[in-house]
Image: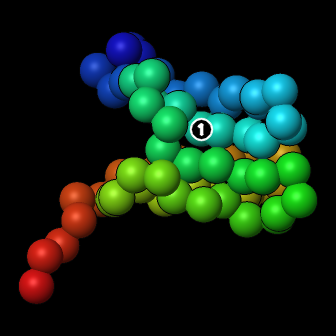
Amino acid sequence: MSDEGRPACEIHRDENGDVFVLVGGTKIAKRTAHANTWIMLEPGWLVRDVKGGKAIEVRYERARMH
């Protein structure tokens, strides 16, 4: 957990060159070696590039059900 009680956010690269964002040890998003966008793996999460691709924004919003 971080200082504010939020789970830690980490970036990992696997042996295939795929990049994952993990929150609290759970993979929430993936970017393949050939894509320039993030693919969400868990509902409610948003990951996007900011600062010209030098940083990412990670946000969670509860999923809405209609």
Q: Is residue 64 above or below residue 27?
A: below
Local secondary structure at mark 1: strand
Between 37 and 17, the residue placed more toward the observer is: 17
Q: Where is residue 22 in the image (x, y as percent from the top left)?
A: 53, 32
Between 3 and 20, the residue placed more toward the observer is: 20
Q: Residue at x 89, y 59 (%)?
A: 34
From the image, tell me which residue sits under label 1: 21
Q: What residue type is labelled 1?
A: Val
Between 24 and 34, the residue placed more toward the observer is: 34
Res. 63 in view:
yes
Q: Position of residue 12 (x, y in %)?
A: 70, 27
The image quarter containing residue 36 is bottom right
In this view, the residue farthest toward the left is 66
Q: Is residue 7 above or below residue 54?
A: above
Callout 1 crowding tier (Cα within 10 Å): few <14, some 14–19, many ≥20: many
Relative horizontal placement of residue 1, taking residue 36 as reference (left or right): left
Q: Residue at x 65, y 38 (%)?
A: 20
Between 54 and 62, the residue placed more toward the observer is: 62
